[in-house]
Image (tube, rainbow, N blue to C red):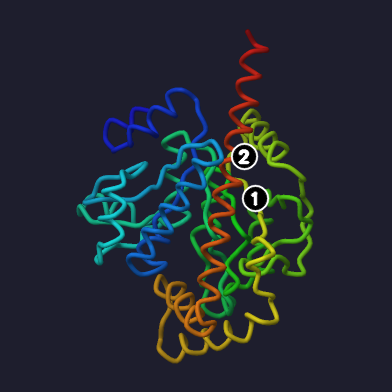
Amino acid sequence: MSWMNEYVVADEVLEALNNHAPVVALESTIISHGMPYPENVAVAKRVEDAVRNHGAVPATIAILKGRIHVGLTPDQLEQFAQTREVMKCSRRDLPFAVSCELNGATTVSATMIIAEMAGIDVFATGGIGGVHRGAELNFDVSADLQEFANTSVAVVSAGAKAILDIPKTLEYLETLGVPVIGLDTAEFPAFYSRTSGLALSLSLPTTAAIAAVIHEKKRMNLKGGILIANPIPATYEIPAHEIEPFINQALQQAAENGIDGKELTPFLLKTLNAATAGKSQQANEQLVLNNAAVAAQIACDLVAIRRKQRFIAL
């Protein structure tokens, strides 16, 4: 891990990595572009606490003045949450943000890249990006999907964001050869909703079983990530028939205002939050917390498998 000499790794994270302890990567876009201050920092701390409470070390990944950070101190998290000029960074943006000494929030793709560099196998997010509605006309496809083909990190997610074309997103992942595994579900979740009507060919009942797949994939030296589909807790679900009219309305407003590219998803989420009187934001927060807890359990199970393998080898 010679790259760590050039970037900043929090002491807690570095100690865990050196001791082969469970670590979970966390993105920072949800902090800078997901909700306003101070709600954003409060949620970020709760997500980190969810990881710790389930036995793993959280590593929130961000770029501070051109330095890549794997894990943020409480003071850094607070400062980042209050910073207004933050670049939303995917794979293409990382060199630019670093060379120009900018503040950057990592998307799913950028977080996967940095997590793999650091040797972190498990990453918790809310929902992945994917194929946008109308992509057959505008070719709007998130860089997250291609990253799954390139980067060997397991991502725990409540499916793809409901604002996307979920059937096309799954087709794209299948074309790339990305395993999509449902955790105790045979149907792909749709972010706010536990079901999408789309069946999954791969499903496992426990985090330990999923950790075994991650271990075997790495042992076989198969390049690429794994998407773990973890439905939102039933208590906080917004059924598809309830949220869909609001999504269509938000998409129409975005089109009328010429909003697209990087600004589209934040705009849609903000518009949905207003239209649902905060219900969609609450669902978003709860599914992220749930994903963080599950990711921590998977990371712990993965460490247990590896320790057992080392013991057998001895």
Q: Secondary structure at mark 1?
A: strand
Q: Position of residue 41 (x, y in %)?
A: 36, 58
**Of the residues shown, which amino acid type is indicated by label 1?**
Ile
Q: Residue sitting at 52 percent across and 33 percent down?
A: 22
Q: Position of residue 289 (x, y in %)?
A: 54, 55
Q: Residue sitting at 53 percent across and 50 percent down?
A: 124
Provide the residue designation for mark 1: 228
Q: Residue sitting at 65 percent across and 19 percent down?
A: 308
Closer to the camera in the image, 222 or 201: 201
Query: Earlier along the polypeptide chain: callout 1 or callout 2?
Result: 1
- Can you tell which of label 1 and label 2 is closer to the viewer? 2
Q: Eyeballing the image, is 286 above or below 293?
A: below
Q: Which mark is residue 298?
A: 2
Q: Residue sitting at 57 percent across and 75 percent down?
A: 163
Q: Position of residue 60 (x, y in %)?
A: 40, 47
**Of the residues shown, which amino acid type is indicated by label 2?**
Ile
